[in-house]
Amino acid sequence: MNCSRNDVVLLPIPFTDLTSRKVRPAIVVGGNGADLFLVPISSVLANTDFPLKQWRAAGLNVPSGVKAQLATVEEKLVVKVVGQLAGKDVQALNAQLRKWLKL
């Protein structure tokens, strides 16, 4: 699968005890060869750093937000690209990435 920056993708995420995994959404923030850098998306808004204003345009079914976590995964784990972040959400994500990474 060919993923681009700001794509919203679905991929299997393991539970913390590694007994199982569930398909969850994430946003592609970069890549390096066969690996993708992602930030997770959650529908539990209290557990997120900022809400997505245009979540429907991003291909999500419910209001969701972005968590302050960065993960690296193999691109082959992506099940599906469901959408792409829109204007204001791209700006908010870029600002948060600079803040989180202290750039």
Image (spheres, helix red, strand yellow):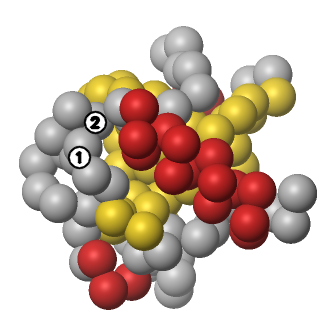
- 62 w.r.t. 31: above or below: below
Residue at 64 percent of width and 39 percent of height: 29
- 47 w.r.t. 82: above or below: below
Q: Which mark is residue 58?
A: 2
Residue at the extreme top? 2
Residue type, mark 2 in image? Ala
Left or right of 49? Residue 25 is left
Q: Residues within 10 Å of mark 1 (few under 14, many from 20)?
A: some
Report the front residue among 101 and 42: 101
Report the front residue among 9 and 79: 9
Residues at marks 1 and 2 touching, judged by CB atoms closer than 8 Å: yes
- 2 w.r.t. 23: above or below: above
Residue at 50 percent of width and 16 percent of height: 1
Residue type, mark 1 in image? Trp
Residue 33: quarter of image: top right
Q: Is residue 25 visible?
A: yes
Identify residue for label 1.
55
Residue 82 image point, x, y percent: 28, 29
